[in-house]
Amino acid sequence: MPYFLNAEEREKLQNELVKMNFNRAKGKLRRMDRKAKLGTYRNVQNSGEWMTTYDLPSLGAHVTLIESRALGTDDPNNRVKPHYEMVRVIVQPNAGNRT
């Protein structure tokens, strides 16, 4: 029987991920579940919010990382690499997770 995350563990994971930058959060999710699948990558559904989703089938969870973009400068002649900041994280149970 697979081990699924219960509500308390999902909340703990959510609190850990919101404090990380994107690359650390992505790495943690991929290490937690070898079968982790990337759903969408920085998809824009709301103005100013970039969403990345992961399915963790072995843990029975669906994770959404929500970031906002911070610009570095207003000078149009300088190309500035955008910086993304983690705004919030949503950890939901999958359909098979009854815990």
Image (cartoon, grey):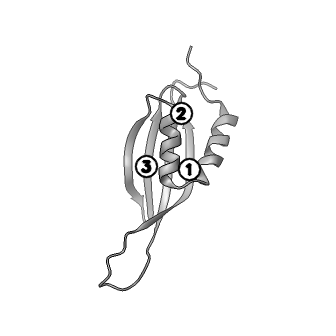
Can you say whether 10 is above or below 83 in the image?
A: above
Q: Secondary structure at mark 2?
A: helix
Tag 3 near tag 2, CB within 8 Å: no
Q: Quadrant of the N terminus?
A: top right
Can you say whether 71 is above or below 5 in the image?
A: below
**Residue found 64% across the figure and 26% down from its top:** 99
Q: Earlier in the sequence, mark 3 or mark 1?
A: 3
State left or right for residue 36 relative to residue 15. left
Query: What amino acid type is highlighted by mark number 2?
Result: Met
Residue 90 locus on image (x, y percent): 56, 46
**Residue found 67% across the figure and 35% down from its top:** 9
Residue sticking out furthest to the right: 8
**Residue found 70% across the figure and 36% down from its top:** 8
Q: What distance separates the C-alpha of mark 3 from that of mark 2?
A: 17 Å
Tag 3 near tag 1, CB within 8 Å: no
Q: Which mark is residue 52?
A: 3
Can you say whether 41 is above or below 95 in the image?
A: below
Dot 1: few (<14), some (14–19), or many (≥20) neighbours within 10 Å? many
Please tell me whether mark 3 or mark 2 is closer to you in this view: 2
Query: What amino acid type is highlighted by mark number 1?
Result: Val
Q: Which residue is mark 2?
A: 32
Q: Earlier in the sequence, mark 3 or mark 2?
A: 2
Quarter of the figure with residue 88: bottom right
Which of 85 and 89 lies nearest the eye of the viewer? Answer: 85
Residue 23 locus on image (x, y percent): 47, 51
Q: What distance separates the C-alpha of mark 2 from that of mark 1?
A: 16 Å
Q: Which residue is mark 1?
A: 89
Please tell me whether mark 2 or mark 1 is closer to you in this view: 2
Residue 85 locus on image (x, y percent): 51, 62
Residue 67 locus on image (x, y percent): 49, 59
**Residue found 43% across the figure and 49% down from its top:** 52
